[in-house]
Image: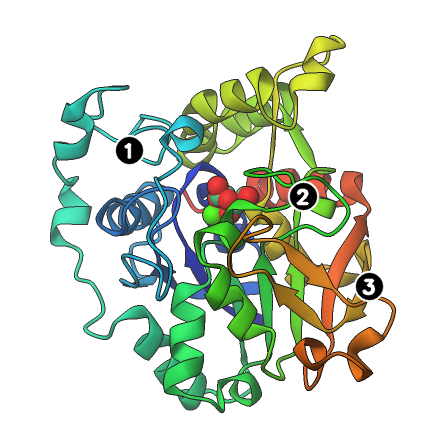
Amino acid sequence: MHKVILDTDPGVDDAMAIAYALAHPDIELLALTTVFGNINIDYATRNAQYILETLGAQSVAVAKGAAVPGVQSPLPHADFVHGADGLGNVYPGSQPGSAATQTAPLTATARHASLEPLDAADFIIAAARAEPQQITLVAVGPLTNIAEALRREPELPSLVAGLVIMGGTVSEPGNVSPVAEANFLNDPHAADALFAADWPATVVGLDVTHRIMLGDSHLKSLQDHARNTGDLIWSSSRFYVDFYTRSGAAKEASEQGAEPQCAMHDAAAVAYVVMPDAFTVASGAARVIPDGLAVGQLALDRKGYAYSLPHWQNRPATHVCMSVDAERVRQDFLSIIIDHHIR
Ligand code: BDR
Ligand code: CA
C-alpha cells in the first residue's frame, strides 16, 4: 500500500489524478495539498474540496498552500486550458468566460469542510515526521509547496518514501514555451531547489505524458461506468479536450482525423507510483533554468558533465521518465476508476 500526499492545483487533469489515486486499491490518499497554478490558490483549494465531495471522499485532508511563487512574479493562470473556474467551467455557479465564475459560491461541502490548520508545507513536514519513509509525495502543480517544505525541514528527503513530480520535459517540446513545461515555468526556482536535494526523486514530464492521450471514447467510458466520478471527469474535460484538440498536443492528430483527445499528465505521476516498470528513465544531475530565454527548461545531465562544471556539481541523480508503455497506463487508469470508484 502506497501512502500518498498529492500536491495539486486542480485543474482538470489534476481531478483525473485525484480520482485515480482515490480509486486505486494500492494507494491510500492521505491528503491533498493545494498550490496556485492552473488557477488561483483559493479556487484551487475550493476545487480540491469540491472534487473530494463529488467523489465521496470528504475524509481526505486538504491543506492550503502557496498563492504565489517564492522568487519570480506570478504568471497568468491557465484559464484557456482549464476554464475560468479551473474545472472546465463546471463548478456549480460557474459561467464560462464570465466574471461571475470568479464569485461562484462555495458548494455546501466546500463551505463547511474544514481546512487543515497547518499550511501545505507544514502539513507535509508533520505527516513525514509522523510516518518516516512511509509517504510518497506526488507533486502535480508548481513545486512551491514542496520547496518550501524542504526549506523548513532540510531532512525531508530522508523522511519520505519518494517524490514523484509531474513537470518538465527533456526531448519533447515544451507546452508553454519551446523548452518549458507549465509546472516548472510557474516556479522554476522551486523546481531547481528540489533537484539539489538527495531525494529518491522521479520526474514524469511531457516526454511521457504527451504519449498517454485520452480520447473522448475513453472519457465517455468513464461517464458511462463510473457514476459521479465519471461524470465529473467527462464534464470537466469538455473545455480541456477542446483546447488540446484545437491548439494543444492533440492538434496534429485531430487534423489527421483522430477523435478529440487530451493529455492525462497528472494521473501519469500517480501511475508511476504503482507501476514504475511501465516507464523507462534517464538519470543525472538536473537543473531548471531560473530566468532568461530558456526560463523553466529542465536540463538533465545525461552525459556526466557534472564533474567539471560548478553549476552541476553536488547534485544527486534525478530520474526522468523518457518512455512509457502508454497503453498499459491508460488502461490501468480507466479500469481502476471504473472498477473501484467510491461514488
Ligand atoms: C501540467 O500543467 C498543468 O496545466 C496541468 O495540470 C499539469 O500539471 C502540464 O504541463
Ligand atoms: Ca496540475
Observer-nearest of 34 and 304: 304
Q: Amino acid at mark 3?
A: Ala
Q: Is residue 39 above or below residue 284?
A: above
Cα–Cα span, label 2 and label 3: 15 Å
**Residues at badges 2 and 3 in contact (C-beta under 8 Å)?**
no
> Residue 270 in the image: x percent, y percent?
59, 56
Q: Is mark 2 within 8 Å of ligand 1?
A: yes
Q: Nearer the viewer, mark 1 or mark 3?
A: 3
**Residue beneath disc 3:** 282
Q: Quadrant of the N terminus?
A: bottom right
Q: Is mark 3 within 8 Å of ligand 1?
A: no
Label 1 vs 3, first from the N-terminus: 1
- Residue 209's mark? 2
Q: Is residue 4 above or below residue 87?
A: below
Cα–Cα span, label 2 and label 1: 24 Å
Q: Residue at x 80, y 48 (%)?
A: 324
